[in-house]
Image: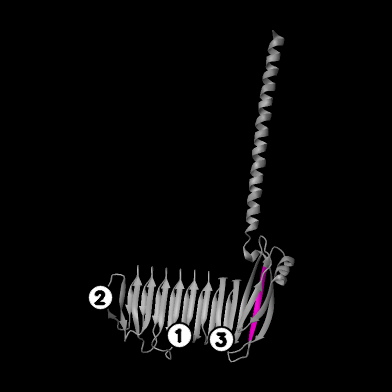
Amino acid sequence: MLRMLRDIGNSNRKGRKMKSDFLTRILLNCLVFSLIAVAGCNIQIGYSHPSFLLAKYERTVQLSKPMAAGSLFSAKSNDGWITVTGGDITECNVTATIIARADSDTNARRIADQTKLRLEQFGNKLTLKVQRPILMFNQSVDVQIDAKVLKNCDLELGTDDGDITIENVKGRVDVKTDDGKVSLSQVGGDIKVRSDDGSIKVKEVTGDVNLRSDDGRITVVYSKDADGVCNISLVTDDGAIDFTAPTNFSADVEILTDDGSINTGLPIKVMGKLGRIGIKGTIGTGQGRLYIRTDDGSIRIR
């Protein structure tokens, strides 16, 4: 009988030990999976290092090509600003600053050295080409472009992420940016600007103006020397619009805002009823065209 009781006791102890070992294995597995999850989180954090923690390398490239009056200068920068200044010169001079970032000094320098720029001429069109290497995690390259051009030329400029600034150009200007501010001054030709996200500021201009921003304020100031008859379209989905007309301005007018006030310092002869969200009418003899619309913002006309 005693022997039977001892066997039962030993069996119970073995059962408890097996249960304890089983629970220990479960706890160890949970701990391992937790460590793997934490390690995974650390890897993800490493993937998104802030740029100020990465190694940085800069180099400068200078290019030049002859430029004739009436030429077209074209440039596109995926990441980085573009500045173009016109002058009484006979060639296009480009200074590009290449800024590379990576996880080491060696990789940052390699990326900067592999980023190539060249000026290509085809007929009267001069194009700045930017060729970037394939980038891995925690790697980036910005190309900042500063161009001096003949002022009697046309411009076609674009950035994916970067501001665009133009000054003292007498030809036509066509600008597109996905994310960046646009600033133009002393432009003599017709202007077309598209910004998906950023303000547009145009001053001392004389030609037709067509501006569109999905998210940003629009400011336009015409030169006192501008012709009073112009075709102007200013549209933003989210932002105020401030328009200063040329002297002796004459236009057919349509001004609309879904959410905001309309303030005009110019006499507008209203056609039909004064709408809750807009005005239709004429300024002067109504020879040109002025269309202003914002979905969310106030409008001021001076």
Expressed as whole percent of the image width and height from the top left, the position of residue 206 reads 45, 87
Q: Earlier in the sequence, mark 3 or mark 1?
A: 3
Q: Which mark is residue 153?
A: 3
Q: Is residue 175 above or below residue 248?
A: above
Q: Which residue lies at the image location 66% right of the left edge and 45% below the top edge?
A: 36
Q: Which residue lies at the image location 41% right of the left edge and 81% below the top edge?
A: 231
Q: Secondary structure at mark 2?
A: loop
What's the distance in space between the residues labelled 2 and 1, CA to CA?
30 Å
Q: Which mark is residue 150?
A: none
Residue occupied by mark 1: 207
Expressed as whole percent of the image width and height from the top left, the position of residue 222 reads 43, 85
Of all residues, the one furthest to the top in this rendering is 1
Q: Is residue 258 left or right of residue 115?
A: left
Q: Secondary structure at mark 3?
A: loop
Density class for disc 1 (Cα within 10 Å; few <14, some 14-19, many ≥20) is many
Q: Looking at numbered disc 3 in the image, what kind of residue is underneath it?
A: Cys
